[in-house]
Image (spheres, rainbow, N blue to C red):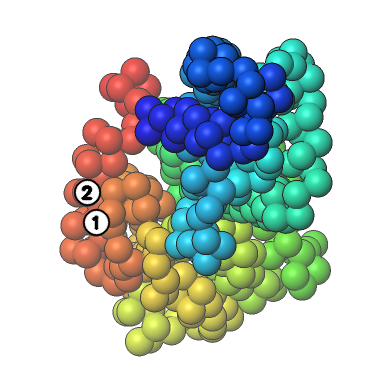
Amino acid sequence: MSSIRGVAAFALASSLLFPPVAGFTPNTNDAKKIGKLQIVQDMDGRRSFITKAVVGIAPVIAFFPSDAIAAAKRAEIPLQKYESMSSVDYAASLKAKYTSEPNADLRDMFRKPALREKLQKEREERDPKYVELKAKRVEEERLLAEAEAEKEKQRIITKANAPPDAPRILVLGGTGYIGKEVRKKLERGGIFVVATSRNGRDGTVALDINEASFGKVESQVRELIKENKCSAVISCIGAIGTDADLVINGAAGQAALGAIQQPSVRNFVALGVSPDTKAAIPKGFEDYVKAKSFSCGIVISEFGGKENGVSYTLINPGKVEKSKTNYGGGASVPLDTIVDAILVGATAFYTGEESAVLDTPEQIKAQAAKFTKVKETLFTAANSA
């Protein structure tokens, strides 16, 4: 309202200050001739003209867009003030500043919306500050998109490297006396299992340790784990009194080297030598004890002291009940007890168990007693009944 009054006042003042209009202002020299009545008529005519001018200007003032004045005020925002604004506020202020060029809003009032939009874009494109801000925003969006893509990539990698939601186990020596029972119990419990044997019989994968060159066991185990996304490896490989004792019993160490390279693996279980056998090595057991001890050392080195649920379990029975194989000295341990202890170690990541070395029958039995928890939490009810 104050602006309207100001414009009206300016019009009135102009009419009074500007030189009189011919035909309405009497000449002083002629005043005497015309007479007083003529002067009064001319003065009335001037007032009538001013009145008509004000009446004509008032609608234009009233129709003048109210946001034009606000835009003009925004245009006066100092440039340094933009530094304290957010990018959104800065863009809005800068846009208002530039689009408030002289008479732009007033002219746009009489243009079609499509033309107004076209001209607005042209103004923005000519404004260096707006162009710079637009380029900056495009760059920010590009960087944000790259960051989101990298985040998604890392999520996929993490998921691919993480252990599966349920145990998936590789059994080396899956057709031997102990390995066969381990495999059966896993399958009855609904746990995914892939097993190896010398010649690939009974649904196993062929892995002949005798014929494998150095490093082949490591690479083949690594590939089997990768293909099947295994969470654990159980080595039931062993031989006593053969010419290949060193090679066969040392294979568990090579398997551990391959297994640790696959990030999905969390647990490694191996069978070792009992303390009694180590204390008094029977004749013919030298290579067996040496190779088994070597393998167990590698397992501890590769799987010990790790985070994220990585652990090892070494089970060192003296004798296995009803087994025809002589494992050396020490008390006999039931086969089922050894199998249960093995499965507790192979599922340690899912049950929260830690690394363990089981040297005595009592320790093996204590570990086997935890199998109840494995059965309740991981084995499917239909298959474990």
Dot 1 corresponds to which residue? 367
Q: Residue 276, position in %: x, y?
A: 32, 79
- Looking at the image, which residue is at 51% across and 55% down? 77
Q: Quadrant of residue 128?
A: bottom right
- Looking at the image, which residue is at 75% across and 70% down? 215
Q: Quadrant of residue 46?
A: top right
Local SS, label 2? loop
Residue 117 seen from this side: yes
Residue 221 seen from this side: no
In the foreground, 255 or 56: 56
Relative to residue 200, is residue 95 drawn left or right?
Answer: left
Q: Which mark is residue 370?
A: 2
Local SS, label 1? helix
Q: Residues within 10 Å of mark 1 (few under 14, many from 20)?
A: many
| Residue type for callout 2 | Lys
Q: Mark 2 and mark 1 in contact (Cβ < 8 Å)?
A: yes
Q: Residues within 10 Å of mark 2 (few under 14, many from 20)?
A: some
Q: Residue 9, position in %: x, y?
A: 45, 33
- Tell me if residue 187 comes above or below residue 96 in the rendering: above
Q: Residue 348, position in %: x, y?
A: 34, 53
